[in-house]
Image (tube, grey):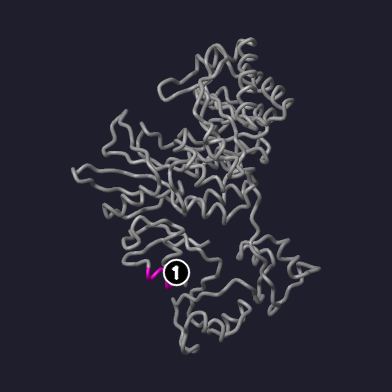
């Protein structure tokens, strides 16, 4: 997959011609709100694996053909060049990814990096016995791009048949589906949710249903509720029995524990609860995971962080979901919701105390629109990244990209004269997150939450990874 950022005056027809990909294919993979109206800064996924080479001063088609292991005639034919001797700097040439002719100064490692394949696969494909002995002019076969195997979880809080419809749309991309969530009560029982249609849809899509329990709601932080449960062994045993009963009755195969705002003094009680839970559920053939706040270090202060003991979770449970989102909180000032520079600080700590093969990267699917000037307590509107692009198109806003946060944003003025600032996800930010997952060698990705359409994400996810099913 390629990513193209729309420039001033560009049309879909022009972009289609640049990449030799049909307008229909570009429109389909991006699900454009209006194919006839693009905005500057809009990122488009281009469904192509070819190389696109920009002609430099002094280039000839013969030299380019030699570099990429093809012929002048083939490049001229593919690019509809009538006179092969008449090319000019800035011309973009499409070159199907097939082979490469080694140039002076090349190394196998550099060639592997250029084409996005592993060094070992390049060596194997060309039966190279000594990687240090490659010579200019040698032709190398470029193997198909390898995709790491990862697991993907999707939380969803839309219940019943509406939620099941979303699962049927997105379930093919998931390893796990987590209907959110069963709320614990002080006596160890659980408040039920209408999850049966979602579980049935997940199973039909070969996604594993993962039960989720929590202690908080939109109106209650849940710290006292968690404290009552975590410090009473009778309540804990009742809760675990209730969990096992529901999992057996409904077809869940694992459990996700999302206890937030746990009191700092209950840190060890929470760890003991996890140990008891894992013992009971493993014995019954179920797996256990947790969701944890995005910590920068062991001693980070705050109700969200202190009781989340990263080393203990990494030791006790089967995998850990890092909730690496919500910097751009709906009641806070406008900013990137999932700034990659901050996420990497969380990952740096996480991988130092949790095995990498147990870490899931939290990925938010939603966008936010803040009214300007922001006032304390004023709540931003939350919607999909597709709606964010639609608003940029509707109001003629130029989409900008924060290179530090690796996140797109734009500002616009509505019909009443109010200013707005929108932060969202696009193909660039999604690809940056996927590259981070690969560079840190993480086990998976967890989406919060299904129900916010973002087709570019799913296309790029499939292009970057093989999803464990």
As displayed, is residue 134 above or below residue 397?
below
| Relative image position of residue 323 (x, y in whole percent) | 53, 35
Mark 1 surroundings: few (<14), some (14-19) or many (≥20) residues within 10 A? some
As displayed, is residue 283 above or below residue 443?
above
Tell me what residue is drawn at x 47 percent, y 89 percent. 83
Q: Is residue 460 left or right of residue 119?
A: left
Q: Is residue 247 left or right of residue 458?
A: right
Tell me what residue is drawn at x 73 percent, y 73 percent. 134
| Relative image position of residue 236 (x, y in whole percent) | 62, 15
Along the viewing direction, whichever of 228 and 413 lies nearer the viewer: 228
For the stretch drawn in magenta, what is the main secondary structure? Answer: helix
Q: How many labels sit on residues?
A: 1
Instruction: State which region is magenta.
Output: 13-18
The quarter holding residue 249 reads top right
Could you say whether the residue bearing mark 1 is in a helix, strand or loop? loop
| Relative image position of residue 401 (x, y in whole percent) | 40, 52
Q: Which residue is mark 1?
A: 22
Along the viewing direction, whichever of 335 and 417 lies nearer the viewer: 417
Name, please, the residue furthest toward the left: 416
Name, please, the residue furthest toward the right: 129
As displayed, is residue 387 above or below residue 318?
below
Tell me what residue is drawn at x 33 percent, y 49 percent. 410
| Relative image position of residue 105 (x, y in whole percent) | 66, 72
Tell me what residue is drawn at x 47 percent, y 33 percent. 160
The quarter holding residue 151 reads top right
Q: Per the image, is 371 magenta?
A: no
């Amino acid at each position: 997959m390629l990513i193209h950022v729309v420039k001033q005056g560009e049309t879909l027809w022009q972009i289609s011609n640049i990449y030799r990909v049909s307008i229909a294919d570009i429109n389909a993979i991006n699900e454009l709100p209006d194919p006839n109206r693009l905005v500057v800064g809009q990122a488009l996924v281009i469904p192509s694996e070819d190389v696109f080479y920009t002609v430099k001063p002094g280039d000839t088609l013969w030299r380019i053909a030699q570099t990429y292991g093809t012929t002048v005639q083939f490049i001229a034919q593919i690019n509809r060049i009538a006179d092969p001797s008449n090319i000019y700097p800035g011309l973009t040439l499409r070159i199907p990814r097939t082979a490469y002719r080694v140039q002076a100064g090349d190394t196998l490692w550099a060639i592997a990096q250029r084409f996005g394949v592993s060094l070992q696969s390049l060596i194997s494909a060309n039966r190279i016995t000594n990687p240090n002995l490659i010579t200019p002019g040698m032709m190398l076969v470029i193997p198909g791009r390898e995709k790491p195997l990862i697991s993907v979880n999707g939380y969803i809080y839309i219940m019943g048949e509406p939620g099941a419809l979303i699962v049927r749309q997105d379930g093919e991309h998931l390893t796990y589906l987590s209907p959110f969530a069963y709320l614990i009560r002080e006596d160890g029982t659980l408040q039920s949710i209408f999850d049966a249609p979602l579980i049935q849809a997940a199973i039909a899509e070969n996604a594993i249903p993962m039960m989720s329990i929590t202690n908080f709601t939109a109106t209650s932080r849940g710290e006292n509720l968690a404290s009552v449960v975590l410090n009473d062994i009778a309540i804990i045993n009742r809760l675990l029995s209730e969990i096992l009963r529901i999992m057996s009755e409904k077809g869940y195969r694992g459990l996700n524990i999302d206890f937030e705002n746990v009191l700092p003094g209950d840190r060890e009680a929470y760890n003991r609860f996890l140990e008891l839970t894992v013992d009971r559920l493993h014995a019954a053939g179920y797996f256990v995971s947790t969701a944890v706040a995005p910590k920068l270090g062991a001693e980070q202060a705050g109700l969200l962080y202190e009781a989340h003991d990263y080393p203990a979770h990494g030791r006790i449970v089967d995998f850990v979901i890092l909730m690496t989102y919500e910097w751009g909180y709906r009641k806070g000032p406008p900013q990137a919701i999932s700034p990659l520079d901050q996420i990497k600080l969380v990952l740096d700590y996480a991988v130092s105390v949790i095995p990498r093969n147990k870490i899931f990267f939290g990925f938010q699917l939603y966008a936010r629109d803040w009214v300007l000037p922001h006032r304390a307590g004023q709540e931003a509107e939350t919607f999909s990244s597709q709606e964010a692009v639609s608003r940029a198109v509707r109001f003629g806003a130029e989409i900008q990209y924060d290179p530090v946060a690796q996140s797109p944003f734009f500002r616009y003025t509505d019909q009443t004269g109010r200013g707005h600032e929108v932060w969202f996800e696009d193909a660039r930010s999604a690809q940056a997150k996927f590259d981070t997952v690969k560079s840190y060698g993480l086990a998976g990705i967890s989406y919060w939450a299904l129900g916010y359409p973002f087709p570019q994400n799913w296309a790029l996810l499939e292009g970057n990874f093989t999803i464990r099913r």
